[in-house]
Structure formats: C-alpha cells, structure tokens
Amino acid sequence: MRKSYHGYFLIAPIMLGCVMFYAIPFVMVLRYSVLQGSGFSANFVGFRNYIHIFDEPTYSLSMKNSALFLSLGLPAIMVLAYLVALMLQKQAGKHQLLKSVFLFPYIMPVAGTVLLVDLIFSETGLLNDFFALLHLPVADWLAGPEAFWIVILLYLWKNTGYSVILLLAGLVTIPEDQFEAAELDGASAWQKFRYITTPQMWYSVFFALVFSVINAFKCFREIFLIGGQHPNDDIYMLQHFVNNSFENMNYGNLAVSSVLLLIVILVFFGIFYVFVSKKEAYRG
C-alpha cells in the first residue's frame, strides 16, 4: 500500500498539470460552445452556435482548404515515407547519419523554415531569378493559388523524415527468418511485402499517421508566417479561423470549431484503429 501511495505521489504533478492545462480548458470550450457572449453575461443558446457556424463563409473556406490539405498531404507523406523506409529496411543499422539528416527538417526552427521558403518562392526569390534568366514569366508564388502547393511541399519536406524513422522502427522488428523462409518457398518480393511486411506494420502505420496529422496542424505556424493573419483564400486554414475568432472575442465560433475538429479527428482515428485492430496479425 505504501508503494502505491509513493507512485501516486510521483505522478501527482503530471496529473495536476493535465487537469489544469487540458481537462479544465476542454470543459470551458464545451461550455462556450453552447453560450453566446462571454463572462457572466453569456446566454445559453444550446446548439444554435453549431448550426450558425456553417453559415460563416470563412469557416466553410477554412474547412475546405484544411480538408484538401489533409486529403492530399497525408496519403503523400505516408506513401513516400513507407517507400523510403522499405528501401532502408535491410540496412537500417548502417544509416545512422542518413536518419539524422531525415530529422533535420523536422527540428529546423519555424522562422528558419519560413525564411527558406521566402528565399526561394517570394517575388524576389531564387525561383523568379531562375525564371528570369530563362525569359519565363515570374510571379509572386506565395500570394497566388500556387501557395497551397508550396505549403504541401513544405509539409512533406519537413515531416517525411520523421515518419520514415517511425516506420523504419516498425520494419526492423519483423523477424528476418520469416523472409528467409518465404524465399525458400519461392515467394516473390511482392508476396513477401503483402503477406509478411504489411500485416505486421499496421500499428506502426497507425502510429505514424497520428503524428502526421498532428504535424499537419502544426504546419499552421509556417502558413501563418508566410501568409499572415489574413492570407489569400487558397491557404486560409481552420487554424486561421480559430485564431481570428479568438482575436475578435467570438468565443462561440472558437469553441464550436474546436469541438467539431476534435469530433472529426476522433472519428477518423477511431475508424482507422478499428480497421487496424481487425487485421489478422493482431487477432488475439
């Protein structure tokens, strides 16, 4: 019993921090999502805020851009990271330096990343200088529709390496004797990938996908510095709507958009987790 109390004492600061900085703010967000106004003068309006938010053109724009960003960025980063991890699978222990290089974009400061993007894609950047030498038309790439694809490339460049490390950690745990036995039975490379590698990689893929989604929302920091608080419509993301709602003290829109985002993420991960759990390699 005394050891149990000792354990509770050790985790108490962490639990207290979770309650203060996560649980209580979450309850406050739920409260504001059904209120109109702020403070003691707020009125209970039920689900009216949830209904009215879909009439906000900026919310619809931010949801469309965010959904498009995730639907393009997530499959691209998972496929690219998986291919690179597979290429490094058999020699994972010999590529420590290469794995460090993969992580460099991920740990690069946000300001440095934005300066690099501005150096290449701004109106006076290197890309326009190169086009001018070839007598091709130049443009302000960060102020037009091209900005969306630049942000996608930025997301892939910054986060693919981290996903490679996560997937590679799962690949190296697959016993080598399984591949050797498959080769003796005459299995092709595709058959080994399908029947040995893939069934044992679903949880690693799920883990990498979770972090890829988190990193996708973190990409807002770069987008905010590139396009500002009110960027062009092509890179106006959900985080812009949340940030602007907070600045305008529109706590109803702020809370509702946060709750809806949480619901979408939980449903998405819930469906994928159920799918992963039903795979043959993990049946109990």
Image (cartoon, rainbow, N blue to C red):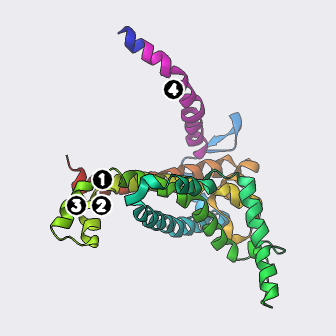
On residue 197, which mark appears? 2
Is residue 277 visible in the rendered image? The answer is: yes
Q: Percent x, y for residue 266? A: 44, 51
Closer to viewer: mark 2 or mark 3:
3
The reply to whether dot 1 and dot 2 touch (C-beta < 8 Å) is yes
Q: Earlier in the sequence, mark 2 or mark 3?
A: 3
Please report whichever mark, 4 or 1, sits nearer to the chain's N-terminal start. Answer: 4
Task: From the top left corner, tell me how far across and down residue 32 is, in percent.
Answer: 61, 42
Disc nearest the viewer among 3 and 4: 3
Locate residue 226, reporting x and y percent.
75, 63
Viewer-nearest of discs 4 and 2: 2
Could you tell me the amino acid type at mark 4?
Answer: Met
Type of amino acid under label 2: Thr
Q: What element carries label 1?
A: loop
Quadrant of the frame with the N terminus: top left
The numbered mark at residue 174 is 1
Q: Residue at x 80, y 91 (%)?
A: 135
Query: Is residue 184 depicted above or below 144 in this figure?
Result: above
Q: Helix, strand or loop at disc 3?
A: helix
Along the polypeptide, which appears first: circle 4 or circle 2?
Answer: 4
Asked whether, in this view, residue 5 is left or right of residue 152, the answer is: left
The residues bearing labels 4 and 1 have C-alpha atoms spaced at a distance of 36 Å
Q: Residue lying furthest left in this view?
A: 185
Work out whether residue 271 can be spotted.
no
Mark 3 lies on residue: 180
Mark 4 Cα-neighbour bin, 10 Å: few <14, some 14–19, many ≥20: few
Disc number placed over residue 15 in the picture, else none? 4
Residue occupying image coordinates x 75% and y 58%: 225
Which amino acid, mark 1?
Ile
Chain part drawn in magenta: 6-34
